[in-house]
Amino acid sequence: MKPASDYFHQTYIEACNAFREATQANGGILSSYGNHPDQGMHGETLTTNVAYFGPKNPEKIFITTSGTHGVEGYYGSAAQINMIENQLKNLPDDVGVLVIHAINPYGFSHLRRVTGSKENVDLNRNFIFDQGEDSIIPLNLGYKHVAKYLVPEKWAKNDSIRQEADQQLAAYKNTFGAQAYLSAIYKGQYQFPDGINYGGQEPTWSNKTFYQILQDCVPASVNEVAYIDLHTGWDEYGLVAIYTLMEAIHENHLRAKAWYEKTADKIMSSPFPVVGSIANATNEYFSERNVKVTTTAIEVGTVKSPGTTLTALRGDHCLYRYGNGDIHSLEGKAIKEKMREDYCPSDPEWREQVLQKSANIIGATINQLKLTAENKLEVGVGVELRKRKNN
Ligand SMILES: [Zn+2]
């Protein structure tokens, strides 16, 4: 097995090439989704690559996405390529694996969380637009109080505008508490198109591409789906947690708890109500088709406590809103380096640790699908099934 550091790449282009090569070398079927309205950081074409492994008509499928939050894809890509090279050799007969690489290729390439140079959308808040149906746009009342201070006109630390902005944010946190502060910023907002965690006004390229991939690549034979969306930047350094974004009593959350209690460092329901996530969209998509579905996100910790990556994120937004996105300026370079380091630390120990823990969670997922395919007892609901059979 290669050292962990070999799975982490420095650019979107390198990560894409490694993903394609690993897919071909390990017998996967590769497809690509292009026509992205933007270009990459080095002028490259942006595509989402998809790999499928397993039988033509599986009963169960494991789906994973990387780069929903662009820059977080440097870790997600590493976890996916590691899985392709080391974990798919002896797939059970009834289980397929669909690997979606860089679902937000713009953010991945430009070391950003958002989906496009003009869109400025947090893809994980963009799935409120049901295909064709009228959507209710949620209101985030807290955001408007912090909007101006999150993305100040000047980012230099010693500039009075930046200092005033930082003070105002700290004051908001003091007055309303850490939970309300994080919720105002992170639960998503639809009123400030230039702001942070903006959910957009319509489905983005990445949103539409995701649905297209599900339509094209999930065989009609599938009766059960496990889905993991790969993220970084929220939790404590080196921690690999499972987040369901569901209420703690939701059956999806309870199933995830049973599946991952031995492999995840912790299993969390939603820290605050989040709408428009890709995991919830996946849940709805398959539930509507009467397919059993368990959706989760892996959150890999890179920071001291939730919200610490906010500084990097604010700097990045300032750079594109007020600094023409000039990544070659001194300030621009520093902002990009901070984005990379805060969302995918270069520390080799961190990389090895999180790759191993992620592989354990992925292994548990495939094993769980195998168990249910073989009609063996499912953890958690097994006792109930047995009882029913005996009656
Ligand atoms: Zn994320």
Image (cartoon, rainbow, N blue to C red):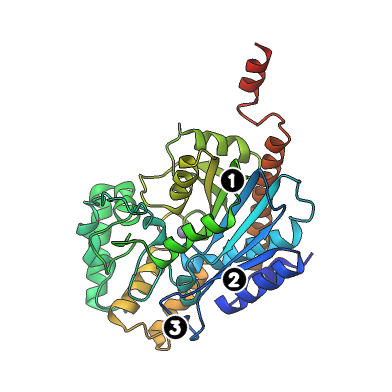
Kindly report which numbered mark, 1 or 3, lies closer to the viewer in this rendering. 1
Q: Nearer the viewer, residue 86 or 29?
A: 29
* Mark 1 and mark 2 residues within 8 Å of each other at the beta carbon: no
> Which badge, 3 or 2, is on the more N-terminal residue?
3
- Residue shown at 60%/41% (left/top)? 224
Under circle 1, the secondary element is strand
| Residue 78 percent across, percent down from the top left | 63, 65
Q: Position of residue 237 (x, y in %)?
A: 54, 57
Percent position (x, y) of residue 56? Answer: 69, 53
Q: CA distance from mark 3 to mark 2?
A: 16 Å
Relative placement, left or right, of 85 versus 139 is right
Which one is in front, 159 or 312?
Answer: 312
Q: Is residue 46 above or below residue 78?
A: below
Residue identified by numbered label 1: 226
> For mark 3, what is the residue?
333
Q: Are marks 3 and 2 in contact (CB under 8 Å)?
A: no
How far apart are the alpha carbons under marks 1 and 2?
Answer: 30 Å
Local SS, label 3: helix
Q: Residue type at mark 3?
A: Lys
Closer to the N terminus: mark 1 or mark 2? Answer: 1
Q: Residue 247: x, y in percent?
A: 42, 37
- Circle 2 is placed at which residue position? 346
Name the residue nearer the viewer: 177 or 13. 13
Tag 1: amino acid: Ala
Amino acid type of the residue that numbered disc 2 sits on in the rendered structure:
Ser
Cβ of mark 1 under 8 Å from ligand 1: the answer is: no
